[in-house]
Image (cartoon, coloured by chain):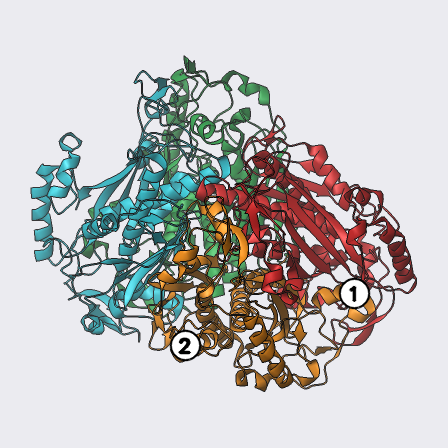
Chain colours: A orange, B red, C green, D cyan
Amino acid sequence: MPGNSFGRALVLTGWGESHGAAIGGALDGMPPGVAVDIADIQSALDRRAPGGSRFVSQRRETDTVEILSGIYEGRTTGHPVAFMIANSDARPRDYSAIKDLYRPSHADWSWRQKYGVRDPRGGGRSSARETAVRVAAGALALMVLRHLFGDGASVRGALIELGGDAVSRDNWDWNEIPRNPFFCPDADAVARWEKRIDDARKDQNSLGAICQVEARGVPAGLGEPVYDRLDADIAKALMSINAVKGVEVGAGFGAARMTGADHADEMRSDDSGKDDSGGVKFLSNNAGGVLGGVSSGQPVVARFALKPTSSLARPLRTVDTGGAEVEAQTKGRHDPCVGIRAVPIGEAMLALVLADHALRQRGQCGGFGVAPG
Amino acid sequence: MPGNSFGRALVLTGWGESHGAAIGGALDGMPPGVAVDIADIQSALDRRAPGGSRFVSQRRETDTVEILSGIYEGRTTGHPVAFMIANSDARPRDYSAIKDLYRPSHADWSWRQKYGVRDPRGGGRSSARETAVRVAAGALALMVLRHLFGDGASVRGALIELGGDAVSRDNWDWNEIPRNPFFCPDADAVARWEKRIDDARKDQNSLGAICQVEARGVPAGLGEPVYDRLDADIAKALMSINAVKGVEVGAGFGAARMTGADHADEMRSDDSGKDDSGGVKFLSNNAGGVLGGVSSGQPVVARFALKPTSSLARPLRTVDTGGAEVEAQTKGRHDPCVGIRAVPIGEAMLALVLADHALRQRGQCGGFGVAPG
Amino acid sequence: MPGNSFGRALVLTGWGESHGAAIGGALDGMPPGVAVDIADIQSALDRRAPGGSRFVSQRRETDTVEILSGIYEGRTTGHPVAFMIANSDARPRDYSAIKDLYRPSHADWSWRQKYGVRDPRGGGRSSARETAVRVAAGALALMVLRHLFGDGASVRGALIELGGDAVSRDNWDWNEIPRNPFFCPDADAVARWEKRIDDARKDQNSLGAICQVEARGVPAGLGEPVYDRLDADIAKALMSINAVKGVEVGAGFGAARMTGADHADEMRSDDSGKDDSGGVKFLSNNAGGVLGGVSSGQPVVARFALKPTSSLARPLRTVDTGGAEVEAQTKGRHDPCVGIRAVPIGEAMLALVLADHALRQRGQCGGFGVAPG
Amino acid sequence: MPGNSFGRALVLTGWGESHGAAIGGALDGMPPGVAVDIADIQSALDRRAPGGSRFVSQRRETDTVEILSGIYEGRTTGHPVAFMIANSDARPRDYSAIKDLYRPSHADWSWRQKYGVRDPRGGGRSSARETAVRVAAGALALMVLRHLFGDGASVRGALIELGGDAVSRDNWDWNEIPRNPFFCPDADAVARWEKRIDDARKDQNSLGAICQVEARGVPAGLGEPVYDRLDADIAKALMSINAVKGVEVGAGFGAARMTGADHADEMRSDDSGKDDSGGVKFLSNNAGGVLGGVSSGQPVVARFALKPTSSLARPLRTVDTGGAEVEAQTKGRHDPCVGIRAVPIGEAMLALVLADHALRQRGQCGGFGVAPG
C-alpha cells in the first residue's frame, strides 16, 4: 500500500524529508557484476543540484552521494545498493511563517487531509528535494542498461518549452545543452528564456515548462501487456515527478490530430547493414518507440509538462489551518521555473523504467529482441 | 513481473484473447458487504460494446458478463469477484491474410520481438477486446466508491475532440452524451463529427480523439506519495489503454503555458454550508483535483489522447515475417476512430484507480479527508 | 493487500467458492513457448480429486479443467493462462444446519470477525475445494520447470505419517505411491493406515498426517535473499494449504537436536562425471537443498504437518452466531484425514515456488547455477 | 523480483552487509501519528546485540540506531521511517582465510552459484548481522500494534529448547527471561544449558535450538485468505531468519499426532465480563490463534527451529573455489548457538507480520474483529 517504492524487478525505495538529517534510497534487484562508477552518480546529481545558476534555487547543497551497500570492488553484488545524501543546508527556520497555512497549489492542504499531521519544514517529503534520490538511482539504472545492452544504450533530455516559448526543431543541437543553464538544445532560445525568467522574477511570478526525454540503444521487447505497458509505466514515472501535469509518448496529443495514414510508422527492409536490426527499419517514429505497450527498438521518446512554480513572492489568497482567510507569500529559496531542473529527473525516471522492464523481460522471456535500423 | 494485474489494494487481474474462448478477470480486495447489481455491470459493458452505431466496429457481440465468484445474496463477500465474457462472435478466419506480416502501428512487430511467438487471431491479447474486462471491473470499482463515499461519488466522461475538432465548452451538456454515438457533450459538434467520420471512412483513413474523464464526490487524501501519486497512477491507468499516446491532469500541458499567478488555485473560507467541506473552498481547479499527488477533494479531472485507428482499408508499406517488403491492408471490422469507445474505458480506469487508492488510504491512515466546497 | 495471488514472477491468482458456479485461476508470467499438455493438468487434478477411495471425501466431482486463454497451438503465448473448473456437484442444502454456528477449528469464527459477512455454503472460499486451483496451476508450473531445466526436473511427494504412525525409511518405494489410496511409499504402512482410518471413522473422529515433498533436477541459485529466501517461500506456500500447522526443510526440527559437526553437509570434488555439476558433490543433505535461502542444486526437500480434519460426526461444544451455547456435528461429506489429499497440493505449491524463483533468478542474474553431483 | 522487502502494507526494505559501512532499512506504510520512542528501538537492538555474555559472539558493536526520516516531533508522519546502524566493529581481515573456499552449510556455495560474484567479507549480506535491521523494524511494528490496539498488544518470545534439552512447561516464568543470557523461561534449564554450551565449545562444536514467540492483545480478523494467510506469512517471516529450518503454529507438528476430537478448540459463551470479547471464549488454543488463516483473537503462538551454528573451530571437509578438496575451519567470532539471539529476531518478525496484516485488514474491511475471552 505505501508509495515510496518504484519498479517491480529493479525497485527503488526512497526516503527522506527536505529538512531532516538526510535523504536516500535503496535500489534492489541490481544484477550482479554491473560496473559502478560513483563519480557518474555524483555527476548526475550535480546536473540536478540547485545553486548552479541564478535561474534556479539558491539553496546551496553539495548533494554528495554516499554509497552504503551493495558494491564490492567496483561492481554490484546483486544486493541492494543503498545510498544517502546528507541535507547539509537545511534551514527549517525559513518556513516558520507558512507552517500554519495552506500554500495554494502546494501539497499542504491535501497532505494534511491525508495524514492528519504535517511536517512543515520546507514541505517535508513533498519537497522536490526527494528527486535527488531519483537522479542517483537513475544513474545506477543507466549502468544496468549499459551492462545489458552495451554503451550504445543512452538516455538524454532537453527543455523544449519555457513559459510557452518553444525551441525550434531546426536549431536543435544536443551539444548545446550543457552550455546553458536551461538544458536547452536551441542556442537562440537561451537568450529569450533568460529574459523570460528575469521578467517573471521581477513580476514575482513563475513559469511552466515542457521537457523531452529519450532513450536510444534499447532493444524491442520491453513492456508488460496489458496493464504494465512500457508507455504506461513511463507515464506513471514522469507524472510522479513534482509539478508534472501532463505526459505524452511519441506524437502524443498531436497524434489525436493526425489521420491514420499520416500517423502510421511504415516499415521497410533494412539496408543499413546494422547487426541485430531484425532486417527491418521504420520510416517514422510517431509511436515514440512503443507499439502495443512494448518497445519497438526505435528511440523511446516522451515529453512531460510542468506547471509554473507554486511558491510565489507575491501574495496569494488562502486559508490558515484554523480556517481564517489569509495571504500566502513565499520568501524562501525557490526556482522561478521548476521545469528547468526536471530534465535530469525525467532522464532518471526513464532509465529506471527501462532497466526495470529489461529485467522483467529477461525473467519471463529469457532474452531481448532487436533494434531495427 | 507479469503485467496483467492492476492495482495494489483492489487488484484487477485480466486474461483472455480476442478470439479465444472468453475474456475475463478477477477483482481481488473487494471490501465485503458492497451491494452489487449485475445489471449495472452489464450496462457499463453495453456502453462500450461494438455494434452500437455505424461509427464503430461492426463486430457484434452481446458481451454478456457472467459473475463466477465473490458475491453472495447480492453483496460482496470480501473474496475475489471473478467474471467472464464469452467471445460469441470470434471469427479467426478474418485474420489469416495478415498473420505473416507486421501491420504498421500495431503490436505485431514489438510483441513478436518480445515473446518470440505470436497469436495472430485478431491481435490476440493486443486487441482492444480486453478492455471489456476493464469496463466490467470499473463498474465494480464504482460500486466500491459509492459504498465508501455515498451516492455522490461518480465518474463520468466525454469525447471532447475528434479529428482535431474540439467541442465548445459553452455548449457542454452532460445530458447530451447518451443521445449521440460519440459520447459527445456538445450537440453542435455531433453533426460535424458524423461527417468527419464518414469522410475518413470514404478516404480509407482514420481519426484520433481526446477524451476527458472526471470523478466527483471523492474526498481529499487519496494518493500515495511519492511514487504512487494519484495522478501518477491515473496517468498509468489511462496510458495503458490501447492507442492512448498522452495523458494530462487538470490544466495539463496548458499549465506549462500559464504563469504561477494564473495557475494558482487560491482558497477561501467556505460559505456553502456544505457538511464535511473542511471549511474551505477552492476558487479554481487547475490542479485537476490532485495536489502533491494526493486528491484535494475537488473533482478529479483527466484527459487522454488516442491515436487514429491503425487498421486502415488502404495499403500501408510494411515487411512480412520473412523480411520481404509487402503491403498491409485491413479488411476486418474496425472502428474508424478508436477514441469513441474509449470513454467508458477511461471512466473504468479512473474508478479503479480511485477505489484502489481509497482502500490504501483507509489501510494506512484509517479514514478519509474532506471535500472542500 | 488482497491475498488471492501467489508468486512474484509467475503469479497465480485464484478465485471461487466451494458451492458457487466454478473455481478457477489465472497464471500470469508464463514464459512463452512452453509446451502445455492439458491432459497432464487433468491428471494432476485427478490425483487430488475426492471420491477416489473410501478413505477420502465422497463428494463426487469430475473436476474437469477448462483452459480459457494463454495457449495457442499447444504452447504458451506469454499471456495469462486462465482456467476454470465447474462445481458440478454443489449441494448447498447440506450446510443449512451449520450456517448459524461457528464450527470449532474451522474458519467460521475468524472469517466472520474479519469480513462481517459469511458465505456459509460449505465454507465458501475457506473450503479445501480451492486447492484444486493450486493443483492445476502447479501442473503448469512443473511444465515451466521442465521447459527451463529439462525433463530431469521433477516434483514428487508422499504421505509419511498418518495418525502418528510413520512410514519406515527402509521400506520406502516411490513406485508404491500410486498403488495405494494414501500416497504412501511404504507398503507395510498401508494396511496399518487403512485400519487407523476405519477406526477413526467408527469413533467419529479424525487423524492428522505429515507429507513430504521434494524437487529434483533444479539448479543452484534459486531464492532471493534476504526475505524471499527459497525456504521462506516454500514455508509460506505449504503453510497456506488448509489445515497445515507446521513446515520444515531438510533436517527441519530435527536440526535443532543435531550438533554442528553432525549437521554440516560437507563437500568433496565430484567424481561422477556428471555434466554441469560444478565439480563438487555434497556428502549429505541436511540442508534440504537450501543454503542461505538459495537452492544448492541438491534435492529440495520439505515436510508439512496437517491437523486432523476439523469436521467431526461427533458433537463438539460451540456457540451460535447469537452467542448461545450449542453443539456442532457435521453430517456432510468429509475426509477422515485431510492430509491424504494434501500430497498433490504440496507438490503443486513446491512447483509454483520453484518456477517463480527460477524466473526471478533469470531476470536478475541472467542464468542459473549448477546441480552438484 | 528482488527479495529485500518484506510486507505488503507495512513494508520493510533492508540493506547492508556485515562488513560494509552500515546496515539499515526503511519502513514504509507507517500510519501517521504513531508515537515513536527511539529508546525502545535501541532497547530491542541491545537485546539482540552480540557481546552480551560469553555464550554469544564476542563481536562487540554498540549497534546504535540512527533515525533518518519519517518522524517529526516524536510521531510518525506517514512517510518512510529510515534508519541506519553503523558497522563500528567491521574487521574484514578476519575472513581472508576463507574467501576462496565454500564453508559447509553456509551460503558460500549457493550464493556464488546465484550471483556469480561473492562478497567474502564475513559472509557479506548472508551474515546474521542483517537481522539487526529486522529487530529495529520490529520495534517500530510493535509501536504500530500498540497504536492500533492499545497497550495490551504485546509480542514476546523465549528459547524453549537448546541442544535437544527442552524447558519444562511447569517451570515456565516469563520474568526469568531477562535474568539469563538465553532468553530461557525456566531457571532450572539455565544451569544445564550453560554446561551444554561450554561443552560444545570445548568440543569445537555447536548446538541447535527452538524458539517460541507469541502475540497477545491482537484482535480477530488478521490474515488474507487464501494465500496470504496469517500463519503462512508468519511461516515465511520466521523461515527467512538465518539458520531456521522449521516453523510451526499452535500445536504444530504435534497436531499431526492428535485426533480431531482432542485438537478441536471448542467454544463457549464468555462469562469474563471482558469488553469486546464477542461474547465467546475458546477452551483451548491448539490453533495457535489462527483459524482458516485468520487470527481468532486468541494469542498467536509460533515456534521455529534453528540448526546448530555452521561455523566450527574444528576442520570440515569442503572444496575451494578452484575445485580442490580442502578443510574449512573458522577462527572468527561466532555464537556457539545461533538460536539464542534468534528470540528477539523472531519477536520482531512476528510484530512485522501482524502490523502488516492489521493495516491490510483495515484497508479492505475498515476495522477489526474482537478478541474472545
Direction from residue A239 to residue D133 in the image, left or right: left
Please report, as a chain letter, where disc 2 is located: A
**Residues marked 1 and 2, same chain:** yes
Quadrant where the C terminus of chain D is found in the figure: top left
Q: Give the number of the disc on residue D316.
A: none
Q: How many marks?
A: 2
Direction from residue D193 to residue D135 in the image, left or right: right
State the residue at coordinates (23%, 65%). Answer: D87
> Would you say the residues marked 1 and 2 are in contact, meaning their CB atoms lie under 8 Å apart?
no
Q: Residues within 10 Å of mark 2 (few under 14, many from 20)?
A: some
Position above or below: B295 against D167: below
Direction from residue A371 to residue B223 in the image, left or right: left
Image coords of residue C112 (percent x, y): 47, 27
D255 and C102: which is toward the camera: C102
C76 and B130: which is toward the camera: B130
Marks 1/2: CA–CA distance? 42 Å
Direction from residue C95 to residue A66 in the image, left or right: left
Q: Is residue A252 visible to us here?
A: yes
**Element at badge 1?**
helix
Q: Is residue D224 visible to us here?
A: no
Q: Amino acid at mark 1?
A: Arg
Residue with the mark numbered 1? A257
Please report, as a chain letter, where disc 1 is located: A
D235 and D49: which is toward the camera: D49
State the residue at coordinates (53%, 68%). Answer: A338
Residue with the mark numbered 2? A42
